[in-house]
């Protein structure tokens, strides 16, 4: 399936809610939480869009924290029909480039211990297990926290610092730490 990636905007909220509902049995983000990630959180969200029908087929969110050199892959979702087509890999590679552009040195994530497909993807992409998190998810499933060193490329001066229309994301990437306290753990 041919697709393209672009920064998510607030107008993508319905599509992201649909992806959440169809991709996850539990631990879904609410509409309010997704809206916060798109409009107010110190985050960078990308959406994968099918070039055939312009429908969102995946999205991923990277969180930034002030005074931290580590970005957190907070949410990662690929629709069933797009799995195996390179969407997940493309989303991860693009977010890694963004984190490196922002001068960050590491990326971390949490992944369900029973999600072999995601674990395989993360390992192929260079992530290593960091620690075991017992009963991390609402249903009691454990998680692996994984970590990856990012290349030290620094800011890419060719990438504009202005967010896409309808997007409220800081050009500095870490200027403000505005992560909502009620956001649930990431599900990958």
Image: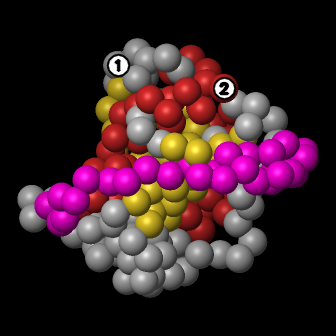
Q: Is residue 10 visible?
A: no
Mark 2 or 1: in front is 2
Residue lying furthest right: 139
Q: Position of residue 174 (x, y in %)?
A: 39, 77
Q: Is residue 77 visible?
A: yes
Q: Position of residue 49 (x, y in %)?
A: 41, 33
Which residue is drawn at the image coordinates 10% and 64% (left, top)?
157
Mark 2 or mark 1: which comes first in sequence?
Answer: 1
Quarter of image, res 149: bottom left
Pick the quarter of the image with the C terminus. top right
Secondary structure state at the residue bearing disc 1: loop
Label 2–label 1 contact, CB within 8 A: no
Determine which of the numbered discs, if any, sits on residue 129 in the image.
none
> Which residue is denoted by mark 1 in the rendering?
2
Mark 2 Cα shell of 10 Å, populated few (<14), some (14-19), many (≥20): few
Quarter of image, res 162: bottom left
Q: Position of residue 171 (x, y in %)?
A: 28, 73
Which residue is drawn at the image coordinates 45% and 63% (left, top)?
71
Q: Which residues are magenta?
A: 130-156
Q: Is residue 8 left or right of residue 186?
A: left
> Which residue is denoted by mark 2 in the rendering?
116
């Amino acid at each position: 399936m041919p697709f393209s990636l672009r920064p998510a905007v607030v107008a993508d909220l319905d599509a992201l809610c649909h992806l959440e509902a169809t991709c996850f049995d539990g631990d879904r983000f609410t509409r309010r939480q997704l809206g916060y990630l798109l409009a107010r959180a110190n985050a960078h969200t990308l959406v994968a869009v099918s070039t055939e029908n312009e429908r969102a087929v995946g999205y991923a969110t990277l969180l930034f924290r002030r005074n931290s050199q580590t970005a957190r892959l907070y949410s990662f979702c690929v629709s069933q029909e797009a799995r195996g087509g390179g969407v997940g890999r493309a989303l991860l590679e693009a977010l890694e480039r963004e984190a490196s552009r922002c001068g960050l040195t590491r990326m971390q994530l949490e992944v369900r211990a029973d999600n072999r497909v995601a674990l395989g993807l993360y390992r192929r992409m260079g992530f290593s297990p960091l620690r075991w998190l017992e009963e991390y998810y609402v249903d009691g499933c454990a998680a692996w926290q994984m970590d990856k060193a990012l290349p030290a490329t620094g800011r890419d001066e060719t990438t504009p610092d202005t967010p896409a229309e309808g997007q409220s994301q800081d050009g500095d990437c870490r200027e403000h730490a505005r992560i909502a306290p009620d956001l649930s753990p990431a599900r990958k």
